[in-house]
Image (cartoon, rainbow, N blue to C red):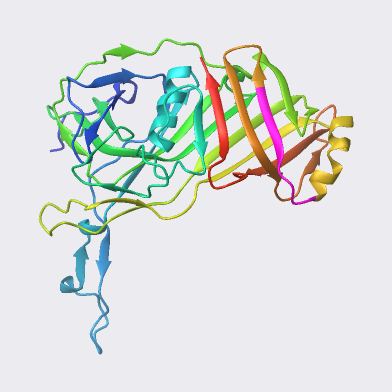
Amino acid sequence: MAETNFQASQGISLLFGSGSKALGTAHVAADQFDALPVISFTVPHDSAALEVAAPRSGTLAQLEGQAKHRRDTNIWTFDVSFKGTPTAVLKSCLWAFGDGSSEAVLAATSGIGNGTNNSASMIHGTSYGNAATVIFSNAGSDGTANDVVVRGCLAQSLTLKEDVGSESGQLVCDVTFWTAYPPIEEANTVAADTTDSGSPKSIFDLTATTLNAEALLLNSWELTMSRSLERVSSQDYSSYLPFGYVQTGPWEVTGNLNVKRDDSVFDLLSQLKGDETGINLSLDESSGFTMDLPDVMVEGPSTADSGGSYQMQTIPFRAFAASTTATIMGLTIS
């Protein structure tokens, strides 16, 4: 007979632990835990990739002895979407590029985000401030060990977006978390130190959006900051703990603007055609929100959309650093 326990999806809540902690060690009740405004999430589960060796000649079946679970190479990813409150956005920036204070700056020197300029690595057991512990309360599969705890989490990808036709125009913050430490199911007793009740930012509060000093009327915008991460081997073949993390490529910052097609779009013709020169993109509220990208270039085809009552223009872009020490993106939010 099947077990009688189950987990109600609407009964799951998430807590996010932050602060300096040895990589691979979970934050505990004495640390800071925030209940952030989560919209949606996926729950990771402890599992392993299965590698199958080549069959022996003359055998037309895969034999059990060919299979090996590769826990020494395991990583886990999961997605969380937040309402774009100042706290949720700044925490996400902390877990991404290591700057959780307004103005949060992603620079050419940010690296893996561990607080050391141009660093591409983090070592197991060494304390850093940019890794999160995520607790999924009431998400476990057991009747009593019904919480899932995930430690050593970095933001592999962070997307900020607003749209007049979605979420009432509110800012949404999508994070893909990455870790090389397995999720643990346990009965966890950690409670939130702070519940984020702040108001999300809104596209309807933007007072100025400019690209190369041309004023644009936004219908929607999106910005994604992402990087590649890998675990460093395995300390042994019993605990399967990694030696640490490495960032294996540069930060890539891409996005798009959907704007009213008007004279400002015409005045951007040389940039849309491509002139290999970085231009400034800025989104501003009257106070409390400024996102500035000093050096962007239009990427790929910019297209006109005639599906509505008036024409819109989609402008895809990629952001760069102007030098090896320059800012890629700066975000002021309060």
Span colored in magenta: 274-283
Residue 142, percent from left and from top: 15, 33
Residue closest to the far bottom: 58
Residue nearest the observer in this picture, 167 or 223? 223
Asked if the stretch drawn in magenta spans residue 178, the answer is no
The answer to whether residue 70 is above or below residue 260 is below
Residue closest to the far left: 238
Q: Is residue 257 left or right of residue 64?
A: right
The answer to whether residue 183 is above or below residue 275 is above
Which quadrant of the view contains residue 22?
top left
Residue drawn where x is 39% and y is 44% of the image: 112
Residue 1, percent from left and from top: 12, 38
Residue drawn where x is 32% and y is 19% of the image: 34
Is residue 326 among the parts visible in the rendering? yes
Residue drawn where x is 27% and y is 20% of the image: 33
Residue 56, percent from left and from top: 23, 85
Residue drawn where x is 25% and y is 36% of the image: 150
Residue 296, percent from left and from top: 67, 41
Residue nearest the observer in this picture, 257 or 43? 257
